[in-house]
Image: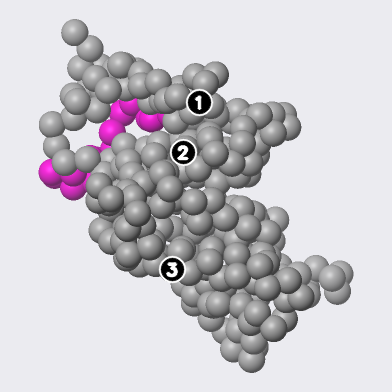
Amino acid sequence: METETSREERPIQLFSIAPNGNFVLNREAVNMVRSIKKKIAVVAVAGQYRTGKSYLLNRLIGRQNGFELGSTINPCTKGLWVWNHPLVVTDDIQAIFLDTEGLASVSRNVHLDTKIFAITLLLSSYFVYNSLNAIDEKALDSLSLVVSLSKYIHVNSHPAQISEELDEYTQYFPFFMWVVRDFALRLVDASQQAINDRQYLENVLRPVDPDKYPDPEQAALKNEIRGKLSTFFKERDCVTLVPVSYTHLTLPTICSV
């Protein structure tokens, strides 16, 4: 019988997605999880497709090769995958790592993306959202699916009470970590004062001024995204990762070369 110590370390599919959009649970992954006798922490990485989620996960588990990396314009990860060998966190806690199908691929739609996002949130203890370059309006728009989460997740048996239960989601949602890869900008606020990564995220989540947008509905959607991110994820943080080639250079320095 295969044991935790003898098992070959590799990713195994936790959920596949059938042509009709249903999630199909993989029995091998279920058995692996059930074999863990200690408390389990679940670390999941999500984000748009072709942004290096699998690479980031491989770094988190300390491997060069682990979760499959794609080299084409097509999505690589399909469904949800789990690393079959838990990592020891403490004497009584082990962590498992989830790789999720990339969001916004041409082969999926918003409905399916939101289902993937929702189930990943519910499975996670620590949710990492991976994106590139900066947290700008485009990056925030990529998380517009949070507006629809309450349609897929209910914390009581009365869907009509959705508007009253938003604050209750906090107790069911994981810690949210926004990882910004290839970040090459100076972290300063509007007055050019230095800020840290967490302050950067908090500044971005502040409501926009509706008067600066000709379309009131556009401004309302932007503020709804910001509001729900702030409400759903009371525990949140941000990490910016500088490209290796920029480690000792900033953009002003590069531009002067």
Question: Label 1 near label 2: C-beta < 8 Å?
Answer: yes
Q: Residues within 10 Å of mark 3 (few under 14, many from 20)?
A: some
User: Mark 2 and mark 3: span between their CA atoms?
Assistant: 20 Å
Q: Is residue 197 visible?
A: no
Main secondary structure along the magenta-highlighted residues: strand
Q: Nearer the viewer, mark 2 or mark 3?
A: 2
Q: Residue furthest front?
A: 160
Q: State the residue at coordinates (24%, 20%).
A: 31
Specify which label sits upstream in the sequence, 1 or 3: 1
Q: Is residue 30 visible?
A: yes
Query: Residue 74 location in percent, x, y?
Result: 69, 29
Q: Which mark is residue 230?
A: 3
Q: Which residues are magenta?
A: 81-94
Q: Amino acid at mark 3?
A: Ser
Residue at the disc numbered 1:
21
User: Mark 1 and mark 3: span between their CA atoms?
Assistant: 29 Å
